[in-house]
Image (cartoon, rainbow, N blue to C red):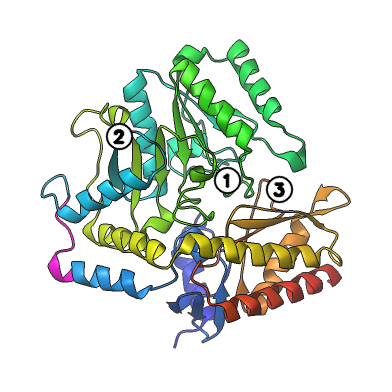
Amino acid sequence: MTSNTELETRRAAALARGVGVQTQNFAVSAENATVIDADGRELIDFAAGIAVVNTGHRHPKVIAAVKAQLDAFTHTCHQVLPYEPYVRLAERLNDKVPGDFAKKSIFVTTGAESVENAIKIARAHTGRNAVIAFGGGFHGRTFMTMSLTGKVAPYKAGFGAMMPDVFHVPFPNALHGITTEDSFAAMESLFKTDLDPARLAAVIFEPVQGEGGFYPAPHDFVKRLRAFCDAHGIVMIADEVQTGFARTGTLFAMDAYGVAADITTMAKGLGGGLPIAAVTGRAEIMDAANPGGLGGTYGGNPLGIAAGNAVLDVIEEEDLCARANELGSRLKQRLEAMRATMPEIAEIRGPGFMVAVELMSEGKPDPALTQRIRVEALNRGLLLLTCGVYGNVIRFLAPITIPDDQMARALDILEEAMRAAKEA
């Protein structure tokens, strides 16, 4: 078998430098929350492909659905020859996405594509161009979504001018001293200096910021944003690409806020490991684009659609929303216990099983300690991801289907890694 070291040598020679990787562990096989690398080493996966395999690697129901679709057909392009599972998945999302109003959906391939299309639809509906996004937010790496993303390194650095008519305001963040009032004061200042609100097509936000640091949007902020959009005829877009499909303890993070977005973007967990993304929104808004203005050759590929239908079945049948809350509570309790010997834990946060810990030393972000913990955990067989504008946040994204005994072992490894990193 080719080793991790050999594969890393080949990777460095063959792949562009811009495709960064966090580890030199090359996956060979995976099952639920376990990955085996090219050296035959077992890793407990607390990344889940960045919240993609919420239902675990190779969930039997997802695999069976994809195999059945393989036996029927793999591709026709829905715009050429449509197929019933695409319609069925759209009907299910129209029913499940938050909002007590008629909805319609489209399918694309990636989260960035879903966000791009949400902006297109909002512009078509309103006849306006401008968009407000938030500092620390992440929406993708295409030019529009990179422009929306509120983080320069590594996403914007070196790529030149961003798309026009995209404006950023601070996202509420109590730990770093930004309140809901501060966010709206910045928006009001923007309207006085740079942007006529009559030109504003949409406001896009993540109910829980992902790459930005797993900061949940405060409830008063979301409700005030809804009222602001209603007052000015602005489309409110919830980017649920990372928060969707049981990760936050509800099917969608917006289920917890008591108000609904006009458009919801989603991807990642919908496909259970296969590429599929969706945009669901108010029917009258979604219908604003002309026929042919939305779609794509691979959008709603039959295999991804089959996986999406199976994922929704698994979430319901295995009650993964309740499971996410249970696992998240267990993780938070263990992290709180670690605080006694780890004062660098500045905050533990996140709904459901979308949990993060932020690390600070002497009141300042400590990215070095954060990276040491990640490396120590990996050396012990636990795969972790970091995030945050300052690189000082560890995010926990294990499959929601992780067995209890493996979860317990992972928490033991995490504690060992934190202790070792602190002493290093």
Q: Are marks 2 and 1 in contact (CB under 8 Å)?
A: no
Circle nearer the N terminus (2, 3): 2
The mark lying in front, picked from 2 and 3, is 2
The spot of residue 124 in percent (x, y) is 32, 24
Mark 2 neighbour density, 10 Å: few (under 14) some (14–19) many (20 or more)? few
Of residue 388 and residue 264, the one placed in the foreground of this image is: 264
* Image quarter of the N terminus: bottom left
Mark 1 neighbour density, 10 Å: few (under 14) some (14–19) many (20 or more)? many
Mark seen at residue 390 = 3
The answer for how far apart the CA atoms under marks 1 and 3 are is 17 Å
Circle nearer the N terminus (1, 3): 1
* Image quarter of the C terminus: bottom right
Would residue 114 be counted in the magenta stretch?
no
> Which residue is found at the position 32% from the left and 69% from the top?
62
The answer for how far apart the CA atoms under marks 2 and 3 are is 41 Å
The spot of residue 53 in percent (x, y) is 44, 65
Q: Amino acid at mark 3?
A: Tyr
The mark lying in front, picked from 2 and 1, is 2
Mark seen at residue 102 = 2
Residue on which disc 1 sits:
208
